Image (cartoon, rainbow, N blue to C red):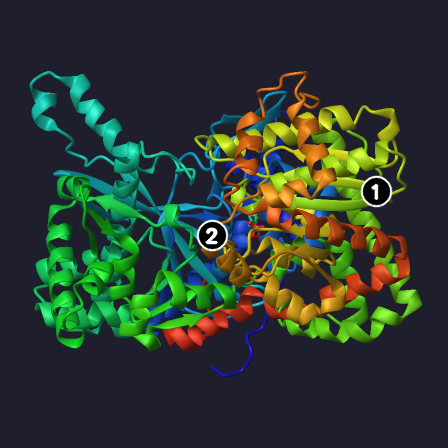
Amino acid sequence: MASPTPAPCPPKGQALLEAMRRHLFSSQAKSASLATTHDHYVCLSLAVRDILLTSWVDTADTYTSQHVRTATYMSAEYLLGPHLENNLVSLGLREEAAAACEALGLSLEEMLAEEPEPGLGNGGLGRLAACFQESMATLELPAIGYGIRYEFGIFRQQIGPNGQMESTDPWLARGNPWEVIRPEWSYPVLIGGQTVIGVAYDTPILGYGVHTANTLRLWSAQAPDAFDFASFNAGDYTRAVLHKVQSETLSKVLYPNDELEQGKRLRLSQQIFFVSCSLQDMFRILASQGIPVTEFHRKFAVQLNDTHPAIAVAELMRLLIDVHGVDWDTAWSITTATISYTNHTLLPEALEAWGLELFQQLLPRQLQIIYEINARFLRTLRIRFPGQPELLERLSLIEEGPHRKVRMAHLAVVGSHTVNGVAELHSRLLKENLFADFARVWPDRFTNITNGVTPRRWLAVANPPLAALLNDAIGTDWCRHLDQLRRLEPLATDAAFLERWQRVREQSKERLAATIRQDTGVLVDPASLFDVQVKRIHEYKRQHMAALQVVERYLRLRAGEDLPPRTVIFGGKAAPGYAMAKLIIRLIVGMAEIINIDPAMDGRLRVIFLPNFSVKLGQKIYPAVDLSEQISTAGMEASGTGNMKMSLNGALTIGTLDGANIEIRERVGDDNFFLFGHTAEQLAAINRSGYHPMPWLENDALAKEAIDLIGSGHFSEGDRDLFHPLLANLCSSDPFRVMADLGDYRRAQNEVDSAWCDAGRWSMMSVLNTARCGFFSSDRSIQEYAERIWKVAPVPVNACSVIPSPSP
Ligand SMILES: *Cc1c(COP(=O)(O)O)cnc(C)c1O
């Protein structure tokens, strides 16, 4: 048991090739002459799936027979990215697959490009959930991921002359070779008096170099079989079908965040839907292993990824009490021993609260339970903090006022044994501000676990040239023990190594340049400094500040200043209802249009907006970044993970003291990080004394000139009104303190320009960024969750399957 598990024995390219041929016939029902590229992609995926199935089946067997303690991760979002290449790397089969494709006259690249991406998340939060799944499997931790199988993921973004246009993402339209439907595991959920059925779809999550394959279980909504038979029998066929359609709407589409009020009803329905199915599934597992329901908390640790699944607190209570006959006090100890909650944001507008009327309509029993939880909670508070009604009001699960609401974050805190933030600063601010009152009540409940990213997808898969160089220089251990990157440090001053480093970086930049040409038609010079900001478009992330900086650069270049050539690359989606974010995209697109055709900018400045930023595109972008823009208003970015991916791949950061930037800087060293801007504390002080942007702007001729140029219609075909809302906002309330940081941002950008001119020094700093980023592996994050919060131990899986290997 204790001996290390052998990696699965990889069949050679020949076996894959035969399996692909077989699947073309038996799965796609085609001859070679009719096969499309997509058919070949499906065949390769099925051939790979055949191989990983032994791990998946053995893992399920091991977990079931050993009654293992299991972590369950509940998340409304999983931004998975394509599976094929990741699975090939985990199985150690990438080269074999390339050979098999070649033998069929295909290229692996072509196959990989065919895979649609499951975009079941908005951004960082969903991507974190995906990195965590992969790390749990790699660390051989018994775990299940629970979520929603949205039929349409995050919208597709196209960029036209007017900025962002959205279309649907029918990622399942041509089938999905990576999932298995489990109709036998389906559960009813009562929402607003109607029953909806959730059906499990399972996707294997392979660990790297181990025999573990965990399960990601996503719920799809179905109308009950005997749907509305009354109408059906009365001859009202249409009405019966409408009900069916209504029920199935539940898992139809992922909500873009930062959206408006509309559609909230469906969102709350989605939350209870997947939470209830997941908890019922856990009770089913308990029963199948003969474990009494009162041992629920010994079998399962449940992690809530933000408040989206916070209704789990009330739903677990309901299932324990109403369905399994447990008394209130026992149910409450089980619930609070089971659940823990990760907070992802301090932004007040992102804190979920549901109107009581809506709640009452959809979930009357759960609301009753929430009232009872609240009554008991407030009773204990009254005893501990007598004569402090304001404190009780602030802590209550119910927000009073004309529109009474359920505060989901409060429900999550009260129902959890542990609450964590996702970077040190964020966790501290949680305790000092958002949850200050709760921290008084339960000081030990709050902790920090800094986020991380998986080195498999974000280095081995995304950056093969760098992975090969690392293997050569420090061995292959870094992929599972990212701390090993430390061993690069002595090489940061080795001229021969720096030259190889430089070549690797050039390759990544050439690859991105080709993508830019393909997606935008613009030619960029891979030798120029690639200055990149890719992430959701949001005012707090301050893409408009980066845009202002580019306009200033344009003005300086036009005035004859000599600055090193830069390619400024933006990417990211704006929520369809977030007008200001869309206007920021429109500004960048307008700038690109003018700047990229200006002969005076030739060889000096290019501006790119890459459409439809996604995991797939990220895999091409992150390795090619020279300068990583992490410029959020201090105190507003909980952690960030894009910052980690870039630094890990050798980018230097220009950033504020926000989120994980602080910890990145601590590790890579002050000399290898371009710091600027006010701290969260300084901004708080400025806010207290009353902030206004005008004093900052009045002393800044260059900023004024840039704003005037935008206002003159220079980037909007003479339209002086288009960007008015953006500029007026910046010059009046400037809620994200762009003007307060702009001058110092410019100073730091000037330092970047000088540093870039010393190519040798830049390369050294780049190596040191990679060498010192080992901490930011999601393996380290997950190890902390497992040890400190879940108390879940690794369970190695041995190859024991009697399933025949897939050779014909
Ligand atoms: C990493 C990642 C993010 C998060 O980026 P931040 O810079 O941390 O906001 C968002 N989207 C995708 C596709 C990612 O890969």
Kindly report the distance in space between the C-alpha atoms of the residues bearing marks 1 and 2.
31 Å
User: Residue, x 73% and y 35% (percent of image)?
Assistant: 551
Q: Which mark is residue 526?
A: 1
Where residue 565 sits, quadrant-wise, is top right
Compared to 453, does 526 lie above or below? above
**What amino acid is labelled 2 in the image?**
Leu
Where residue 663 sits, quadrant-wise, is bottom right
The secondary element bearing badge 1 is classed as loop
Q: Which residue is mark 2?
A: 125
Q: Which mark is residue 794?
A: none
Residue lying at the far bottom of the rendered structure: 2
Q: Is residue 224 left or right of residue 493?
A: left
Residue 532: give x, y in percent of width and height.
70, 45
User: Residue, x 48% and y 34% (percent of image)?
Assistant: 171
Q: Residues within 10 Å of mark 2 (few under 14, many from 20)?
A: many
Note whether residue 13 is visible: no
Note whether residue 443 is visible: yes
Where residue 102 sits, quadrant-wise, is top right
**What amino acid is labelled 1 in the image?**
Pro
Compared to 467, does 384 lie above or below? below
Q: Are marks 1 and 2 in contact (CB under 8 Å)?
A: no
